[in-house]
Image (spheres, grey):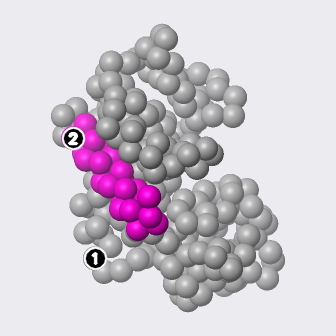
Amino acid sequence: MTAAETRRLRAALEARVLERAAAFRERYAPLTPDRMAAGVGFRWRTAAIAGRDGLLDAASGTILVAEGQSPRRQRFTLAHEVMHRLIEQDGELLSDLHEAYEGAALERALERLCNLGAAEMLLPRAEVERALAAGPNPRLVWELAARFAVSEPTVAVALVGALGPGALAAVFGGDPLAVYFAFGTGAPARGTVLPAEHPLVAVRAAGLPHRGRLVLPGEVRVERAWARPRRGRVYLLATGVGAAGG
Protein backbone atom coordinates (compact mmCIF):
# COMPACT_ATOMS: atom_id res chain seq x y z
CA MET A 1 0.00 0.00 0.00
CA THR A 2 1.40 3.41 -0.97
CA ALA A 3 1.57 6.32 1.46
CA ALA A 4 -1.25 8.07 -0.39
CA GLU A 5 -3.43 4.96 -0.21
CA THR A 6 -2.74 4.65 3.52
CA ARG A 7 -3.76 8.28 4.08
CA ARG A 8 -6.98 7.75 2.15
CA LEU A 9 -7.76 4.59 4.11
CA ARG A 10 -7.15 6.33 7.42
CA ALA A 11 -9.37 9.25 6.41
CA ALA A 12 -12.07 6.78 5.40
CA LEU A 13 -11.79 5.10 8.82
CA GLU A 14 -12.38 8.42 10.57
CA ALA A 15 -15.38 9.16 8.35
CA ARG A 16 -16.83 5.71 9.07
CA VAL A 17 -16.42 6.15 12.81
CA LEU A 18 -18.09 9.57 12.68
CA GLU A 19 -20.99 8.06 10.74
CA ARG A 20 -21.43 5.26 13.30
CA ALA A 21 -21.32 7.73 16.17
CA ALA A 22 -23.80 10.12 14.55
CA ALA A 23 -26.22 7.29 13.75
CA PHE A 24 -26.00 6.06 17.35
CA ARG A 25 -26.69 9.56 18.68
CA GLU A 26 -29.72 10.01 16.46
CA ARG A 27 -31.15 6.62 17.38
CA TYR A 28 -30.68 6.81 21.15
CA ALA A 29 -31.02 10.54 21.88
CA PRO A 30 -31.18 11.90 24.49
CA LEU A 31 -27.87 10.24 25.29
CA THR A 32 -28.19 9.67 29.01
CA PRO A 33 -25.61 7.24 30.43
CA ASP A 34 -28.25 4.50 30.77
CA ARG A 35 -29.39 4.92 27.16
CA MET A 36 -25.82 4.90 25.85
CA ALA A 37 -24.95 1.66 27.62
CA ALA A 38 -28.26 0.02 26.71
CA GLY A 39 -27.73 1.00 23.06
CA VAL A 40 -24.97 -1.63 22.82
CA GLY A 41 -26.72 -4.11 25.11
CA PHE A 42 -24.77 -3.29 28.29
CA ARG A 43 -25.32 -1.89 31.75
CA TRP A 44 -22.93 0.56 33.34
CA ARG A 45 -21.66 1.43 36.81
CA THR A 46 -18.80 3.27 38.45
CA ALA A 47 -15.96 1.32 39.99
CA ALA A 48 -12.39 1.67 41.20
CA ILE A 49 -10.27 0.95 38.10
CA ALA A 50 -6.53 1.23 38.60
CA GLY A 51 -4.86 3.25 35.86
CA ARG A 52 -7.89 3.38 33.54
CA ASP A 53 -10.85 5.67 32.90
CA GLY A 54 -13.15 2.92 31.68
CA LEU A 55 -13.43 -0.77 30.93
CA LEU A 56 -15.82 -2.78 28.78
CA ASP A 57 -16.48 -6.13 30.47
CA ALA A 58 -18.17 -8.25 27.82
CA ALA A 59 -18.43 -11.29 30.12
CA SER A 60 -20.75 -9.50 32.53
CA GLY A 61 -22.29 -7.13 29.99
CA THR A 62 -21.12 -4.15 32.04
CA ILE A 63 -19.25 -0.97 31.17
CA LEU A 64 -17.18 0.16 34.15
CA VAL A 65 -16.38 3.85 34.53
CA ALA A 66 -13.74 5.03 36.98
CA GLU A 67 -15.28 6.48 40.11
CA GLY A 68 -14.32 9.97 41.20
CA GLN A 69 -14.61 11.53 37.74
CA SER A 70 -16.93 14.47 37.12
CA PRO A 71 -20.32 13.55 35.60
CA ARG A 72 -19.25 15.11 32.27
CA ARG A 73 -16.00 13.15 32.24
CA GLN A 74 -17.85 9.95 33.12
CA ARG A 75 -20.23 10.53 30.21
CA PHE A 76 -17.32 10.88 27.77
CA THR A 77 -15.62 7.78 29.17
CA LEU A 78 -18.85 5.84 28.74
CA ALA A 79 -19.21 7.09 25.15
CA HIS A 80 -15.60 6.04 24.48
CA GLU A 81 -16.31 2.50 25.68
CA VAL A 82 -19.53 2.39 23.64
CA MET A 83 -17.46 3.28 20.56
CA HIS A 84 -15.16 0.34 21.31
CA ARG A 85 -18.22 -1.90 21.14
CA LEU A 86 -19.54 -0.31 17.95
CA ILE A 87 -16.19 -0.76 16.24
CA GLU A 88 -15.98 -4.38 17.41
CA GLN A 89 -19.37 -5.01 15.79
CA ASP A 90 -18.29 -3.58 12.42
CA GLY A 91 -16.29 -6.28 10.65
CA GLU A 92 -15.45 -4.13 7.63
CA LEU A 93 -14.23 -1.27 9.79
CA LEU A 94 -12.12 -3.65 11.87
CA SER A 95 -10.60 -5.15 8.73
CA ASP A 96 -9.67 -1.74 7.35
CA LEU A 97 -8.26 -0.72 10.73
CA HIS A 98 -5.90 -3.70 10.75
CA GLU A 99 -4.91 -2.96 7.15
CA ALA A 100 -4.02 0.66 7.94
CA TYR A 101 -2.19 0.06 11.25
CA GLU A 102 -0.19 -2.62 13.02
CA GLY A 103 1.50 -3.20 16.35
CA ALA A 104 1.42 -0.41 18.90
CA ALA A 105 0.18 2.02 16.23
CA LEU A 106 -3.00 -0.06 15.94
CA GLU A 107 -3.83 0.35 19.61
CA ARG A 108 -3.12 4.10 19.49
CA ALA A 109 -5.29 4.47 16.38
CA LEU A 110 -8.14 2.56 18.00
CA GLU A 111 -8.06 4.77 21.09
CA ARG A 112 -7.97 7.91 18.94
CA LEU A 113 -10.91 6.71 16.84
CA CYS A 114 -12.90 5.88 19.97
CA ASN A 115 -12.20 9.37 21.30
CA LEU A 116 -13.25 10.86 17.98
CA GLY A 117 -16.48 8.86 17.93
CA ALA A 118 -17.27 9.66 21.57
CA ALA A 119 -16.84 13.37 20.88
CA GLU A 120 -19.15 13.11 17.85
CA MET A 121 -21.83 11.43 19.97
CA LEU A 122 -21.81 14.21 22.53
CA LEU A 123 -20.85 17.19 20.36
CA PRO A 124 -21.83 16.90 16.66
CA ARG A 125 -19.14 17.76 14.10
CA ALA A 126 -21.54 20.13 12.32
CA GLU A 127 -21.78 22.28 15.46
CA VAL A 128 -18.01 22.31 15.88
CA GLU A 129 -17.43 23.32 12.27
CA ARG A 130 -20.01 26.08 12.62
CA ALA A 131 -18.17 27.38 15.70
CA LEU A 132 -14.84 27.27 13.81
CA ALA A 133 -16.19 29.28 10.89
CA ALA A 134 -14.60 32.44 12.26
CA GLY A 135 -11.27 30.65 12.75
CA PRO A 136 -9.58 28.73 15.59
CA ASN A 137 -10.04 30.32 19.00
CA PRO A 138 -9.18 28.72 22.36
CA ARG A 139 -12.36 30.27 23.80
CA LEU A 140 -14.26 27.56 21.97
CA VAL A 141 -12.99 24.96 24.44
CA TRP A 142 -14.86 26.41 27.41
CA GLU A 143 -17.71 27.97 25.43
CA LEU A 144 -18.72 24.74 23.65
CA ALA A 145 -18.28 22.78 26.89
CA ALA A 146 -20.81 25.05 28.61
CA ARG A 147 -23.19 25.17 25.66
CA PHE A 148 -23.42 21.41 25.16
CA ALA A 149 -22.85 20.32 28.78
CA VAL A 150 -19.77 18.28 27.92
CA SER A 151 -16.27 18.18 29.38
CA GLU A 152 -13.50 20.41 28.05
CA PRO A 153 -11.48 17.34 26.92
CA THR A 154 -14.51 16.29 24.85
CA VAL A 155 -14.47 19.66 23.11
CA ALA A 156 -10.70 19.45 22.58
CA VAL A 157 -11.05 16.08 20.84
CA ALA A 158 -13.89 17.42 18.67
CA LEU A 159 -11.94 20.54 17.69
CA VAL A 160 -8.87 18.51 16.70
CA GLY A 161 -11.05 16.25 14.60
CA ALA A 162 -12.65 19.17 12.81
CA LEU A 163 -9.38 21.04 12.24
CA GLY A 164 -7.82 17.96 10.64
CA PRO A 165 -4.24 16.62 10.40
CA GLY A 166 -1.60 18.65 12.17
CA ALA A 167 -4.04 20.07 14.73
CA LEU A 168 -3.57 20.18 18.49
CA ALA A 169 -5.74 21.25 21.44
CA ALA A 170 -4.40 21.47 24.98
CA VAL A 171 -5.04 23.01 28.38
CA PHE A 172 -2.27 23.84 30.85
CA GLY A 173 -2.55 24.66 34.54
CA GLY A 174 -1.02 24.27 37.96
CA ASP A 175 2.18 25.67 39.40
CA PRO A 176 4.55 25.17 37.69
CA LEU A 177 2.49 25.26 34.53
CA ALA A 178 1.92 21.74 33.21
CA VAL A 179 -0.27 19.85 30.75
CA TYR A 180 -3.77 19.13 32.09
CA PHE A 181 -4.79 17.42 28.86
CA ALA A 182 -3.75 17.49 25.20
CA PHE A 183 -5.03 15.83 22.03
CA GLY A 184 -3.81 15.77 18.44
CA THR A 185 -0.50 15.84 16.60
CA GLY A 186 2.50 16.04 18.90
CA ALA A 187 0.33 16.19 22.02
CA PRO A 188 2.57 16.38 25.11
CA ALA A 189 1.85 13.88 27.89
CA ARG A 190 -0.37 14.82 30.78
CA GLY A 191 1.68 16.33 33.58
CA THR A 192 4.49 17.56 31.33
CA VAL A 193 5.89 20.73 32.92
CA LEU A 194 6.67 23.78 30.78
CA PRO A 195 9.98 25.62 31.32
CA ALA A 196 9.67 28.87 33.28
CA GLU A 197 10.71 30.86 30.19
CA HIS A 198 8.13 29.26 27.89
CA PRO A 199 5.77 31.70 26.07
CA LEU A 200 2.69 29.95 27.49
CA VAL A 201 3.94 30.63 31.02
CA ALA A 202 4.12 34.30 30.02
CA VAL A 203 0.57 34.11 28.66
CA ARG A 204 -0.73 33.19 32.10
CA ALA A 205 1.53 35.60 33.96
CA ALA A 206 0.64 38.59 31.77
CA GLY A 207 -2.99 37.65 31.20
CA LEU A 208 -2.54 38.33 27.48
CA PRO A 209 -3.24 36.07 24.48
CA HIS A 210 -0.54 34.68 22.20
CA ARG A 211 -0.68 34.10 18.47
CA GLY A 212 2.14 32.77 16.33
CA ARG A 213 4.73 30.03 16.36
CA LEU A 214 5.58 27.90 19.37
CA VAL A 215 7.81 25.00 20.35
CA LEU A 216 6.20 22.56 22.78
CA PRO A 217 7.90 19.94 24.97
CA GLY A 218 9.55 17.21 22.92
CA GLU A 219 10.69 19.77 20.33
CA VAL A 220 7.24 19.77 18.74
CA ARG A 221 7.11 22.76 16.42
CA VAL A 222 3.83 24.63 15.98
CA GLU A 223 3.43 26.90 12.97
CA ARG A 224 0.13 28.53 14.02
CA ALA A 225 -0.86 28.70 17.68
CA TRP A 226 -3.61 30.55 19.49
CA ALA A 227 -3.38 30.67 23.30
CA ARG A 228 -5.58 32.39 25.89
CA PRO A 229 -5.41 32.58 29.69
CA ARG A 230 -8.51 31.87 31.78
CA ARG A 231 -8.89 31.33 35.52
CA GLY A 232 -5.29 30.32 36.04
CA ARG A 233 -5.18 28.05 33.01
CA VAL A 234 -3.88 28.47 29.47
CA TYR A 235 -5.98 27.18 26.57
CA LEU A 236 -4.22 26.34 23.31
CA LEU A 237 -5.38 25.55 19.79
CA ALA A 238 -2.82 24.94 17.07
CA THR A 239 -2.51 23.90 13.44
CA GLY A 240 0.54 23.06 11.36
CA VAL A 241 1.96 20.92 14.15
CA GLY A 242 4.84 18.51 13.62
CA ALA A 243 7.85 17.13 15.48
CA ALA A 244 11.15 18.86 14.88
CA GLY A 245 13.02 17.30 12.03
CA GLY A 246 9.92 15.41 10.92
Name the N-terminal-most of marks 1 and 2.
2
Q: Residue at x 48, y 77 (%)?
A: 239
Residue 40 percent coordinates (x, y): 32, 24
Tell which residue pokes out farthest to the bottom in this image: 212
Residue 124 to residue 140: above or below: above
Question: Quick check: is 15 in the magenta stretch?
Answer: yes
Query: Residue 10 lies in what quarter of the image?
Result: bottom left
Q: Amino acid at mark 1?
A: Ala
Query: Number of numbered discs present?
Result: 2
Q: Position of residue 189 (x, y in %)?
A: 69, 57
Question: Image point 58% across, 49% down: which residue?
Answer: 105
Q: Does residue 191 appear left or right of residue 78 in this picture?
A: right
The N terminus, quarter of image: bottom left
Quarter holding the C terminus is bottom right
Which residue position holds label 2? Answer: 23
- Residue furthest left in the image: 27
Q: SS class of the residue under badge 2?
A: helix
Q: What secondary structure characterizes most of the magenta part?
A: helix
Q: Nearer the viewer, residue 150 or 162?
A: 162
Q: Nearer the viewer, residue 41 or 174?
A: 41
In the image, residue 206 lies at what x, y percent? 66, 84
Residue 144 image-quadrant placement: bottom left
Question: Can the viewer see residue 123 in this picture?
Answer: no
The spot of residue 122 in percent (x, y) is: 33, 46
For the record, the magenta segment spans 1-25
Q: Is residue 240 left or right of residue 232?
A: left
Which disc is residue 133 wearing?
1
Spatial separation of the CA atoms under disc 1 and disc 2: 24 Å
